[in-house]
Amino acid sequence: MSEPTTPPKKMNLNREEMPKQPAVVRRGNFMEVALGYPLETARREASRCIQCKKPLCVAGCPVEIDIPGFIRHIASGDLPQAARVLKSKNCLPAICGRVCPQEEQCEARCVLEKKGAAVAIGRLERFIADWEAAQGTMEMPLIPKSTGKRVAVIGSGPAGITVAGDLIKLGHAVTIYEALHEPGGVLTYGIPEFRLPKAIVKREVDYVRALGVDLVLNFVVGLTRTLDQILDEYDAAFVGTGAGLPWFMDIPGENLNGVYSANEYLTRMNLMRGFLYPRSDTPIKKQTRVAVVGGGNVAMDCARTALRLGAAEVRIVYRRSRQELPARLEEIENAEEEGVIFEYLTLPIRYNGDDDGWILNMEALRMELGEPDASGRRRPVKVEGSEFLLPVDAAVCAIGNSPNPLIPRTSAGFEIGKGGNIVADPATGKTAKDRVWAGGDIVTGAATVILAMGAGRVAARAMHEYLTGEKV
Protein backbone atom coordinates (compact mmCIF):
# COMPACT_ATOMS: atom_id res chain seq x y z
CA MET A 1 0.00 0.00 0.00
CA SER A 2 1.50 3.33 -1.02
CA GLU A 3 1.97 6.08 1.54
CA PRO A 4 -0.38 9.07 1.35
CA THR A 5 1.08 12.10 -0.31
CA THR A 6 0.79 15.68 0.90
CA PRO A 7 -1.45 17.61 -1.48
CA PRO A 8 0.22 20.56 -3.17
CA LYS A 9 -0.27 23.90 -1.47
CA LYS A 10 -2.98 25.99 -3.06
CA MET A 11 -1.77 29.21 -4.70
CA ASN A 12 -2.73 32.37 -2.85
CA LEU A 13 -2.74 35.17 -5.41
CA ASN A 14 -3.58 37.93 -2.91
CA ARG A 15 -0.22 39.68 -2.72
CA GLU A 16 0.11 41.90 0.34
CA GLU A 17 0.64 45.55 -0.51
CA MET A 18 3.23 47.58 1.38
CA PRO A 19 1.95 50.72 3.11
CA LYS A 20 3.56 53.99 2.08
CA GLN A 21 3.24 57.70 2.69
CA PRO A 22 0.41 59.38 0.76
CA ALA A 23 1.76 61.14 -2.34
CA VAL A 24 0.55 64.58 -1.26
CA VAL A 25 2.48 64.21 2.01
CA ARG A 26 5.66 62.51 0.85
CA ARG A 27 6.38 64.95 -1.99
CA GLY A 28 7.02 67.52 0.75
CA ASN A 29 9.54 65.53 2.79
CA PHE A 30 12.64 63.36 2.42
CA MET A 31 11.43 60.58 4.72
CA GLU A 32 11.22 57.07 3.34
CA VAL A 33 8.27 56.55 1.01
CA ALA A 34 7.61 52.84 1.61
CA LEU A 35 6.91 52.06 5.27
CA GLY A 36 7.61 48.33 5.36
CA TYR A 37 5.48 45.33 6.34
CA PRO A 38 4.13 44.94 9.87
CA LEU A 39 4.84 41.49 11.34
CA GLU A 40 1.47 39.89 10.63
CA THR A 41 1.42 41.25 7.07
CA ALA A 42 4.91 39.81 6.48
CA ARG A 43 3.82 36.42 7.80
CA ARG A 44 0.75 36.41 5.58
CA GLU A 45 2.88 37.28 2.55
CA ALA A 46 5.49 34.66 3.47
CA SER A 47 2.79 32.02 3.80
CA ARG A 48 1.97 32.54 0.11
CA CYS A 49 5.26 30.88 -0.88
CA ILE A 50 4.47 27.33 -2.06
CA GLN A 51 8.03 26.12 -1.26
CA CYS A 52 8.88 24.70 -4.67
CA LYS A 53 11.08 21.59 -4.71
CA LYS A 54 13.17 23.24 -7.43
CA PRO A 55 12.94 26.96 -6.58
CA LEU A 56 13.55 28.99 -9.71
CA CYS A 57 13.65 32.18 -7.64
CA VAL A 58 17.08 31.23 -6.27
CA ALA A 59 18.44 30.91 -9.81
CA GLY A 60 17.21 34.47 -10.42
CA CYS A 61 19.17 35.88 -7.47
CA PRO A 62 22.69 37.11 -8.32
CA VAL A 63 23.89 36.42 -4.74
CA GLU A 64 22.17 33.00 -4.46
CA ILE A 65 20.03 33.65 -1.38
CA ASP A 66 18.09 30.62 -0.08
CA ILE A 67 14.83 32.44 -0.74
CA PRO A 68 12.37 29.66 0.18
CA GLY A 69 14.42 29.03 3.33
CA PHE A 70 14.28 32.50 4.82
CA ILE A 71 10.65 32.97 3.75
CA ARG A 72 9.65 29.66 5.38
CA HIS A 73 11.08 30.85 8.70
CA ILE A 74 9.18 34.14 8.47
CA ALA A 75 5.95 32.25 7.86
CA SER A 76 6.57 30.02 10.89
CA GLY A 77 7.52 32.99 13.08
CA ASP A 78 11.19 32.01 13.55
CA LEU A 79 12.57 35.44 12.64
CA PRO A 80 16.09 34.94 14.07
CA GLN A 81 16.58 31.90 11.83
CA ALA A 82 15.17 33.79 8.87
CA ALA A 83 17.82 36.47 9.44
CA ARG A 84 20.58 33.85 9.68
CA VAL A 85 19.58 32.22 6.41
CA LEU A 86 19.28 35.57 4.62
CA LYS A 87 22.59 36.99 5.86
CA SER A 88 24.53 33.82 5.15
CA LYS A 89 24.43 34.95 1.52
CA ASN A 90 23.72 38.68 1.62
CA CYS A 91 25.53 41.21 3.81
CA LEU A 92 23.28 44.07 2.59
CA PRO A 93 19.71 42.75 2.93
CA ALA A 94 18.09 46.02 4.07
CA ILE A 95 19.53 47.76 1.02
CA CYS A 96 18.67 45.03 -1.49
CA GLY A 97 15.15 44.82 -0.12
CA ARG A 98 14.68 48.49 -0.96
CA VAL A 99 16.45 49.19 -4.24
CA CYS A 100 16.98 45.93 -6.14
CA PRO A 101 14.73 45.17 -9.15
CA GLN A 102 13.33 41.91 -7.78
CA GLU A 103 10.56 42.06 -10.38
CA GLU A 104 13.19 41.40 -13.05
CA GLN A 105 15.17 38.78 -11.10
CA CYS A 106 13.99 36.50 -8.29
CA GLU A 107 10.30 37.50 -8.42
CA ALA A 108 10.27 37.13 -12.21
CA ARG A 109 11.11 33.43 -11.72
CA CYS A 110 8.47 32.85 -9.00
CA VAL A 111 5.88 30.24 -10.00
CA LEU A 112 3.11 32.59 -8.86
CA GLU A 113 4.34 35.27 -11.27
CA LYS A 114 2.65 33.29 -14.06
CA LYS A 115 -0.59 34.32 -12.36
CA GLY A 116 0.61 37.91 -11.92
CA ALA A 117 1.16 37.64 -8.17
CA ALA A 118 4.77 36.71 -7.39
CA VAL A 119 5.69 36.41 -3.72
CA ALA A 120 7.01 39.81 -2.56
CA ILE A 121 10.54 38.52 -1.98
CA GLY A 122 12.15 41.97 -1.83
CA ARG A 123 9.65 43.28 0.69
CA LEU A 124 10.18 40.22 2.90
CA GLU A 125 13.94 40.66 2.64
CA ARG A 126 13.55 44.26 3.80
CA PHE A 127 11.22 43.17 6.60
CA ILE A 128 13.58 40.65 8.14
CA ALA A 129 16.61 42.95 7.86
CA ASP A 130 14.71 45.78 9.56
CA TRP A 131 13.34 43.42 12.20
CA GLU A 132 16.84 42.25 13.12
CA ALA A 133 18.11 45.83 13.34
CA ALA A 134 15.19 46.76 15.61
CA GLN A 135 16.30 44.12 18.12
CA GLY A 136 19.38 46.23 18.87
CA THR A 137 21.84 43.38 18.44
CA MET A 138 23.10 41.55 15.37
CA GLU A 139 24.25 37.96 15.40
CA MET A 140 27.81 37.74 14.06
CA PRO A 141 29.14 34.74 12.13
CA LEU A 142 32.22 32.88 13.29
CA ILE A 143 35.37 34.14 11.56
CA PRO A 144 37.86 31.35 10.80
CA LYS A 145 41.53 31.38 11.69
CA SER A 146 43.53 33.87 9.64
CA THR A 147 44.99 32.66 6.36
CA GLY A 148 47.74 35.28 6.62
CA LYS A 149 46.67 36.76 3.28
CA ARG A 150 45.86 40.46 2.82
CA VAL A 151 43.43 41.87 0.27
CA ALA A 152 42.86 45.50 -0.75
CA VAL A 153 39.38 46.47 -1.97
CA ILE A 154 39.15 49.72 -3.92
CA GLY A 155 35.73 51.29 -3.49
CA SER A 156 33.10 50.79 -0.78
CA GLY A 157 30.04 50.46 -3.01
CA PRO A 158 27.94 47.28 -3.21
CA ALA A 159 30.56 45.26 -5.12
CA GLY A 160 33.38 46.24 -2.78
CA ILE A 161 31.38 45.66 0.40
CA THR A 162 30.31 42.22 -0.82
CA VAL A 163 33.86 41.18 -1.70
CA ALA A 164 35.12 42.43 1.65
CA GLY A 165 32.38 40.68 3.62
CA ASP A 166 32.88 37.37 1.83
CA LEU A 167 36.66 37.41 2.09
CA ILE A 168 36.76 38.36 5.76
CA LYS A 169 34.45 35.40 6.49
CA LEU A 170 36.96 33.17 4.69
CA GLY A 171 39.81 34.23 6.99
CA HIS A 172 41.57 36.89 4.93
CA ALA A 173 42.53 40.34 6.19
CA VAL A 174 40.68 42.97 4.16
CA THR A 175 41.08 46.75 3.85
CA ILE A 176 38.65 48.89 1.86
CA TYR A 177 39.97 52.15 0.35
CA GLU A 178 37.26 54.76 -0.29
CA ALA A 179 37.80 58.06 -2.12
CA LEU A 180 34.97 59.96 -0.42
CA HIS A 181 34.52 61.00 3.19
CA GLU A 182 31.67 58.55 3.77
CA PRO A 183 31.48 54.89 2.72
CA GLY A 184 28.80 53.27 0.59
CA GLY A 185 29.61 54.47 -2.91
CA VAL A 186 26.50 54.93 -5.04
CA LEU A 187 24.38 53.77 -2.09
CA THR A 188 25.42 56.94 -0.25
CA TYR A 189 25.80 59.58 -2.95
CA GLY A 190 23.50 58.31 -5.68
CA ILE A 191 20.21 57.15 -4.14
CA PRO A 192 17.92 59.68 -2.43
CA GLU A 193 17.12 59.57 1.27
CA PHE A 194 13.42 58.93 0.58
CA ARG A 195 14.29 55.71 -1.23
CA LEU A 196 17.30 54.54 0.79
CA PRO A 197 17.91 56.28 4.14
CA LYS A 198 21.58 56.91 4.85
CA ALA A 199 21.19 55.46 8.35
CA ILE A 200 20.46 52.09 6.72
CA VAL A 201 23.56 52.30 4.51
CA LYS A 202 25.62 53.13 7.59
CA ARG A 203 24.10 50.21 9.46
CA GLU A 204 25.00 47.75 6.71
CA VAL A 205 28.54 49.13 6.33
CA ASP A 206 29.00 48.99 10.11
CA TYR A 207 28.07 45.30 10.02
CA VAL A 208 30.87 44.57 7.56
CA ARG A 209 33.29 46.60 9.67
CA ALA A 210 32.20 44.65 12.74
CA LEU A 211 33.25 41.47 10.91
CA GLY A 212 36.78 42.88 10.95
CA VAL A 213 37.08 44.74 7.64
CA ASP A 214 39.26 47.87 7.87
CA LEU A 215 38.00 51.01 6.13
CA VAL A 216 40.20 53.89 4.96
CA LEU A 217 38.31 57.02 3.85
CA ASN A 218 39.44 60.06 1.82
CA PHE A 219 41.89 57.84 -0.07
CA VAL A 220 41.84 58.29 -3.85
CA VAL A 221 43.60 55.35 -5.44
CA GLY A 222 45.46 56.76 -8.42
CA LEU A 223 46.15 60.05 -6.62
CA THR A 224 46.83 59.35 -2.95
CA ARG A 225 48.70 56.22 -4.01
CA THR A 226 48.61 54.11 -7.14
CA LEU A 227 47.16 50.63 -7.28
CA ASP A 228 50.66 49.28 -7.98
CA GLN A 229 51.94 50.86 -4.77
CA ILE A 230 49.06 49.30 -2.83
CA LEU A 231 49.77 45.89 -4.37
CA ASP A 232 53.27 46.05 -2.87
CA GLU A 233 51.61 45.56 0.52
CA TYR A 234 48.79 43.15 -0.39
CA ASP A 235 48.46 39.69 -1.89
CA ALA A 236 45.53 40.65 -4.14
CA ALA A 237 43.22 43.56 -4.92
CA PHE A 238 39.66 44.08 -6.08
CA VAL A 239 38.61 47.19 -8.02
CA GLY A 240 34.98 48.19 -7.50
CA THR A 241 35.02 51.93 -8.14
CA GLY A 242 31.74 52.07 -10.03
CA ALA A 243 30.77 54.31 -12.94
CA GLY A 244 30.91 57.88 -11.72
CA LEU A 245 31.82 59.74 -14.91
CA PRO A 246 28.59 61.39 -16.13
CA TRP A 247 27.43 61.52 -19.72
CA PHE A 248 26.08 64.66 -21.35
CA MET A 249 24.26 65.01 -24.67
CA ASP A 250 26.86 67.35 -26.20
CA ILE A 251 24.28 69.96 -27.16
CA PRO A 252 24.66 73.77 -27.01
CA GLY A 253 24.18 75.37 -23.61
CA GLU A 254 25.26 72.50 -21.38
CA ASN A 255 27.78 74.82 -19.71
CA LEU A 256 25.06 77.20 -18.48
CA ASN A 257 24.46 77.67 -14.77
CA GLY A 258 21.55 75.51 -13.69
CA VAL A 259 22.47 72.58 -15.95
CA TYR A 260 23.61 69.64 -13.82
CA SER A 261 24.71 66.10 -14.32
CA ALA A 262 22.63 63.64 -12.31
CA ASN A 263 25.82 62.78 -10.39
CA GLU A 264 26.33 66.33 -9.20
CA TYR A 265 22.66 66.90 -8.46
CA LEU A 266 22.22 63.76 -6.36
CA THR A 267 25.60 64.06 -4.66
CA ARG A 268 24.73 67.57 -3.50
CA MET A 269 21.48 66.23 -2.06
CA ASN A 270 22.79 62.98 -0.55
CA LEU A 271 26.46 62.96 0.37
CA MET A 272 26.59 66.71 1.03
CA ARG A 273 23.16 66.85 2.73
CA GLY A 274 21.90 69.62 0.47
CA PHE A 275 18.31 68.82 1.40
CA LEU A 276 19.06 69.97 4.96
CA TYR A 277 20.19 73.48 3.97
CA PRO A 278 20.62 75.82 5.86
CA ARG A 279 21.53 73.20 8.50
CA SER A 280 23.96 71.72 5.96
CA ASP A 281 26.93 73.49 4.39
CA THR A 282 25.72 73.02 0.82
CA PRO A 283 23.47 75.84 -0.41
CA ILE A 284 20.93 74.82 -3.02
CA LYS A 285 19.45 77.40 -5.38
CA LYS A 286 15.69 76.97 -5.25
CA GLN A 287 14.33 76.18 -8.69
CA THR A 288 10.78 76.58 -9.96
CA ARG A 289 10.72 74.63 -13.24
CA VAL A 290 13.04 71.62 -13.50
CA ALA A 291 13.53 69.30 -16.48
CA VAL A 292 15.22 65.93 -16.03
CA VAL A 293 16.49 64.30 -19.21
CA GLY A 294 16.36 60.49 -19.21
CA GLY A 295 14.04 57.65 -18.28
CA GLY A 296 15.91 55.40 -15.86
CA ASN A 297 15.81 55.06 -12.09
CA VAL A 298 18.33 57.88 -11.72
CA ALA A 299 16.09 60.22 -13.70
CA MET A 300 13.17 59.33 -11.41
CA ASP A 301 15.36 59.99 -8.37
CA CYS A 302 16.36 63.43 -9.67
CA ALA A 303 12.80 64.43 -10.56
CA ARG A 304 11.36 63.34 -7.23
CA THR A 305 14.21 65.10 -5.40
CA ALA A 306 13.45 68.34 -7.25
CA LEU A 307 9.82 68.17 -6.10
CA ARG A 308 10.93 67.77 -2.50
CA LEU A 309 13.20 70.79 -2.83
CA GLY A 310 10.16 72.90 -3.64
CA ALA A 311 10.02 73.04 -7.44
CA ALA A 312 6.53 73.94 -8.65
CA GLU A 313 6.88 71.99 -11.89
CA VAL A 314 9.13 69.02 -12.63
CA ARG A 315 9.26 67.23 -15.97
CA ILE A 316 10.86 64.00 -17.14
CA VAL A 317 11.95 64.56 -20.75
CA TYR A 318 12.26 61.22 -22.52
CA ARG A 319 12.69 60.53 -26.22
CA ARG A 320 10.62 57.33 -26.28
CA SER A 321 7.18 56.45 -24.87
CA ARG A 322 6.16 55.23 -21.42
CA GLN A 323 6.30 51.63 -22.60
CA GLU A 324 10.06 51.93 -23.23
CA LEU A 325 10.97 53.61 -19.93
CA PRO A 326 13.83 51.61 -18.38
CA ALA A 327 13.06 52.67 -14.79
CA ARG A 328 11.36 50.28 -12.37
CA LEU A 329 7.57 50.41 -12.64
CA GLU A 330 7.37 51.14 -8.90
CA GLU A 331 9.54 54.25 -9.32
CA ILE A 332 7.58 55.45 -12.37
CA GLU A 333 4.29 55.07 -10.51
CA ASN A 334 5.66 56.88 -7.45
CA ALA A 335 6.81 59.77 -9.64
CA GLU A 336 3.44 59.97 -11.38
CA GLU A 337 1.58 59.93 -8.06
CA GLU A 338 3.77 62.72 -6.72
CA GLY A 339 3.03 64.98 -9.67
CA VAL A 340 6.04 64.62 -11.97
CA ILE A 341 5.03 65.53 -15.54
CA PHE A 342 6.24 63.17 -18.27
CA GLU A 343 7.19 64.69 -21.63
CA TYR A 344 7.35 61.57 -23.77
CA LEU A 345 8.70 61.44 -27.34
CA THR A 346 10.71 64.58 -26.70
CA LEU A 347 14.39 65.25 -27.47
CA PRO A 348 16.33 68.25 -26.08
CA ILE A 349 18.48 69.96 -28.72
CA ARG A 350 19.66 73.15 -26.99
CA TYR A 351 19.65 75.05 -23.71
CA ASN A 352 19.24 78.83 -23.90
CA GLY A 353 20.37 81.19 -21.17
CA ASP A 354 20.20 84.81 -20.00
CA ASP A 355 22.94 87.46 -20.05
CA ASP A 356 24.25 86.22 -16.68
CA GLY A 357 24.74 82.67 -17.91
CA TRP A 358 21.70 81.06 -16.23
CA ILE A 359 19.46 78.66 -18.10
CA LEU A 360 16.13 80.11 -19.30
CA ASN A 361 14.63 77.36 -21.42
CA MET A 362 15.14 74.08 -23.18
CA GLU A 363 14.64 73.83 -26.93
CA ALA A 364 13.30 70.41 -27.91
CA LEU A 365 11.92 68.34 -30.78
CA ARG A 366 8.98 65.97 -30.84
CA MET A 367 9.76 62.37 -31.78
CA GLU A 368 7.90 59.37 -33.16
CA LEU A 369 8.77 55.69 -32.82
CA GLY A 370 10.17 53.75 -35.76
CA GLU A 371 11.59 50.24 -36.04
CA PRO A 372 13.27 48.51 -33.04
CA ASP A 373 16.98 49.20 -32.52
CA ALA A 374 19.69 46.95 -31.01
CA SER A 375 18.14 47.29 -27.53
CA GLY A 376 14.85 45.87 -28.80
CA ARG A 377 13.06 49.16 -28.19
CA ARG A 378 11.54 51.11 -31.07
CA ARG A 379 13.95 53.70 -32.37
CA PRO A 380 12.90 57.34 -31.84
CA VAL A 381 12.77 59.38 -35.06
CA LYS A 382 12.69 63.19 -35.20
CA VAL A 383 9.50 64.91 -36.35
CA GLU A 384 10.79 67.68 -38.60
CA GLY A 385 9.55 71.17 -37.82
CA SER A 386 8.30 70.22 -34.36
CA GLU A 387 10.69 72.41 -32.36
CA PHE A 388 9.30 74.07 -29.24
CA LEU A 389 10.58 75.83 -26.10
CA LEU A 390 10.14 74.54 -22.57
CA PRO A 391 10.73 77.21 -19.87
CA VAL A 392 13.08 75.85 -17.15
CA ASP A 393 15.44 77.28 -14.57
CA ALA A 394 17.25 73.96 -14.04
CA ALA A 395 17.99 70.91 -16.17
CA VAL A 396 19.45 67.62 -14.99
CA CYS A 397 21.07 65.23 -17.46
CA ALA A 398 20.44 61.64 -16.33
CA ILE A 399 21.31 59.60 -19.41
CA GLY A 400 24.09 57.40 -17.99
CA ASN A 401 27.67 57.19 -16.75
CA SER A 402 31.05 55.74 -17.62
CA PRO A 403 33.77 54.40 -15.32
CA ASN A 404 36.31 56.88 -13.99
CA PRO A 405 39.57 56.22 -15.90
CA LEU A 406 41.88 57.20 -13.00
CA ILE A 407 42.96 53.74 -11.85
CA PRO A 408 43.76 52.18 -15.25
CA ARG A 409 45.40 55.45 -16.28
CA THR A 410 47.79 55.32 -13.31
CA SER A 411 48.45 51.56 -13.20
CA ALA A 412 49.40 49.59 -16.30
CA GLY A 413 48.28 46.09 -17.19
CA PHE A 414 44.49 46.41 -17.56
CA GLU A 415 42.54 45.64 -20.70
CA ILE A 416 40.08 48.48 -21.30
CA GLY A 417 36.82 48.11 -23.18
CA LYS A 418 35.27 50.55 -25.67
CA GLY A 419 33.25 52.31 -22.98
CA GLY A 420 36.27 52.80 -20.74
CA ASN A 421 35.34 49.84 -18.56
CA ILE A 422 37.88 47.43 -17.12
CA VAL A 423 37.59 44.08 -18.88
CA ALA A 424 37.18 41.18 -16.45
CA ASP A 425 36.34 37.50 -16.86
CA PRO A 426 32.61 37.23 -16.05
CA ALA A 427 33.15 33.78 -14.53
CA THR A 428 35.82 34.93 -12.05
CA GLY A 429 36.15 38.71 -12.10
CA LYS A 430 39.85 38.37 -12.96
CA THR A 431 41.35 41.23 -14.96
CA ALA A 432 44.36 41.14 -17.28
CA LYS A 433 46.44 42.73 -14.51
CA ASP A 434 48.27 40.32 -12.22
CA ARG A 435 46.64 39.78 -8.79
CA VAL A 436 43.75 42.15 -9.57
CA TRP A 437 40.04 41.37 -9.87
CA ALA A 438 37.21 43.79 -10.67
CA GLY A 439 33.43 43.86 -10.64
CA GLY A 440 30.31 46.01 -10.61
CA ASP A 441 29.78 49.12 -12.70
CA ILE A 442 33.53 49.56 -13.37
CA VAL A 443 33.19 46.40 -15.51
CA THR A 444 29.60 46.44 -16.76
CA GLY A 445 28.85 50.15 -16.87
CA ALA A 446 25.99 51.55 -14.80
CA ALA A 447 23.77 48.66 -13.66
CA THR A 448 21.98 47.53 -10.48
CA VAL A 449 23.12 47.15 -6.87
CA ILE A 450 22.40 43.43 -6.82
CA LEU A 451 24.33 42.74 -10.04
CA ALA A 452 27.33 44.52 -8.54
CA MET A 453 26.99 42.39 -5.42
CA GLY A 454 26.76 39.25 -7.53
CA ALA A 455 29.97 40.22 -9.31
CA GLY A 456 31.59 40.78 -5.91
CA ARG A 457 30.58 37.32 -4.76
CA VAL A 458 32.01 35.71 -7.92
CA ALA A 459 35.28 37.58 -7.51
CA ALA A 460 35.58 36.71 -3.81
CA ARG A 461 35.38 33.01 -4.59
CA ALA A 462 38.00 33.27 -7.31
CA MET A 463 40.28 35.37 -5.12
CA HIS A 464 40.01 32.85 -2.28
CA GLU A 465 40.95 30.03 -4.63
CA TYR A 466 43.93 32.03 -5.88
CA LEU A 467 45.08 32.87 -2.35
CA THR A 468 44.64 29.40 -0.82
CA GLY A 469 44.26 26.89 -3.66
CA GLU A 470 40.89 25.91 -2.16
CA LYS A 471 37.46 26.27 -3.72
CA VAL A 472 34.59 27.71 -1.70
Image: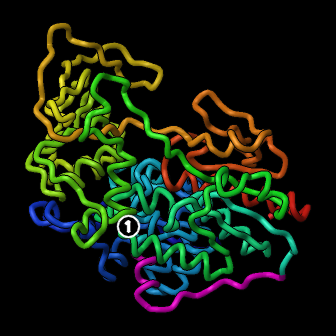
Give the residues drawn in magenta, as a range. 127-145
Question: Could you say which is closer to the camera, residue 385 or residue 331?
Answer: 385
Q: Does the rendering let one see residue 121? A: no
Q: Is residue 140 magenta?
A: yes
Q: Which residue is painted at 13% across and 56% down in the image?
A: 310
Q: Which residue is mark 1?
A: 123
- Secondary structure under badge 1? helix
Quadrant of the snapshot with the N terminus = bottom right
Q: Position of residue 343 (x, y in %)?
A: 17, 32
Scheme of colours in the image: rainbow
Q: In which quarter of the view is residue 359 placed?
A: top left
252 up-or-down from 156: above or below:
above
Residue at 30%, 47% in the rendered image? 329
Depth check: give the residue in front, 174 or 16. Answer: 174
Q: Is residue 123 above or below residue 106?
A: below
**Kind of residue indicated by mark 1:** Arg
Q: Is residue 255 left or right of residue 443?
A: left
Q: Residue furthest right?
A: 469
Nearer-the-camera pick, 401 or 335: 401
Left or right of residue 137, residue 372 in this image: left
